[in-house]
Amino acid sequence: MTDQGKSKELWDNYLDIYNQLQKLKLKQDKKIETIKKNYNIKYPDASIQDKKLNLEKKKQQIKCANCGKHGALIFTDTSVICGADTPCNLSIKLEKPTIIDIPTKLNYLRKEINLQKRVITEYKLDLLFDLDDEEVILNEFQTNKENLEKLLDYANEIKEFYYKKNNMVEVSNSQDNQGGNEGGNESEKVFISRKEELDNTQRKFNQLVNTFKKNIKQYQISGEKSVLSDTIQIYKNIIIPIQSKIRELKYQITYIDEISQSNNGKINKKEMQIFHFMPTKIDIKNESFINDDFEIQENKK
C-alpha cells in the first residue's frame, strides 16, 4: 500500500509527473478535436478515409510542446515522446500501480492461509509417522511456516487498513479533551470509532432539536423576536451542519440518478426533474488500495 510502502514523496512525485503527462495529452487532444471540427464544417460530405488522411496530415503540423518542432506528440496511457522527424529528449514513461480490491484480496489470502495450514499439518503427520526423511520434513515445515506467517501479516495489514478507512474517523482531540491545546491553536488529530462518533453526534443533535423546540414554544408564548432570531441562527449554523455530519458518518457517499419520465428513457429538459438518491455506507474507493508497484521509468525533457 502506498501509504505504508514507498514514501509519500515518491508517490507525490509520481502523481506530479502523471499529471504533467495528462496535461500534455489534453492540450494536444483539444487541437486534434479542433482540426476534426473545422474539417467537418468545411467538408461535411467527406468520407471517413478523407477525414483520416486530413487528420494525419494536420497532426504533422502540430508542434512538440517541448522543442517546438513539427510533429504531434506520441502518447500511450502512461508514456509520451516527441513526434518530430528528429525527436527531442522528451520522454516520460510510467509504470502504473496495481489497484487491489480488498474484499477479493482478503478472500484469496484466506484460501492461501488455509492451504498453508493444511500443508503444515500434513508435514506434522509425516514427521509423526516417519513417512519421509526427518531433515527434509523439518526444512519444508519451516519454509511453509514462514510463508504462513507472511500471509497472516499481509492479511492483518490489509484488514487494519480496511477497518481504519471504513470503521474509524479522524477527529480533533479537543472534542474529547475540552481543556484545550496549550501548545498552540492546532489540536491533535486522533482516530476514533465511526459508530462512537455517530452516537455522540446524534446525541448532541437530539439535545439541540429539543432546545430548538423549547425556544419556539417560548417565542410563541412571549413573542420576543430576539428568541426567534437566536433560534433560527442556531438552526442554520449548528443544527443543519450537525445533520449533514450525521449523514456523512452513516454514509460515505450518496449517488444521485436523474430519472426520466418518458417511455424511451431519455431526459427531457422540459419535464420536471426526478432524482433518485442512493446513500451508500462504503464508498467504492475505500474498498481498494493502490499497491506500491508504481515506477517512474523515465522522465526526460
Image (tube, rainbow, N blue to C red):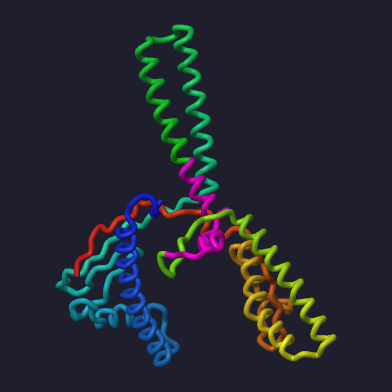
Task: Locate residue 250, reporting x and y percent.
Answer: 65, 61
Q: Residue at x 71, y 78 (%)?
A: 274
Task: Locate residue 293, reporting x and y percent.
Answer: 35, 51
The quarter of the picture where residue 34 lies is bottom left
240 or 32, which lies in front? Answer: 240
Task: Locate residue 178, reporting x and y percent.
Answer: 55, 63
Q: Residue at x 14, y 72 (%)?
A: 86
Give the answer, above or below, for where 150 lies relative to 134.
below
Q: Residue at x 45, y 36 (%)?
A: 151
Q: Residue furthest left?
A: 86
Asked if residue 60 lies left or right of residue 108, the reply is left
Give the answer, above or below, for where 230 lies relative to 85.
below
49 or 92, which lies in front? Answer: 92
Asked if residue 187 lies left or right of residue 280, the reply is left
Q: Residue furthest right?
A: 221
Asked if residue 206 lies left or right of residue 182, the reply is right
Give the answer, above or below, for where 184 lies relative to 226.
above
Quadrant for the C terminus in the image: bottom left
Asked if residue 35 lies left or right of residue 234, the reply is left
| Residue 223 lies in the magenta stretch | no
The quarter of the picture where residue 257 lies is bottom right
Please give the count of numbered marks on the rendered protein.
0
Task: Locate residue 105, reporting x and y percent.
Answer: 50, 45
| Residue 161 lies in the magenta stretch | yes
Q: Magenta span covers which residues?
A: 156-182
Give the answer, above or below, for where 255 lies relative to 229.
above
16 or 157, which lies in front? Answer: 157
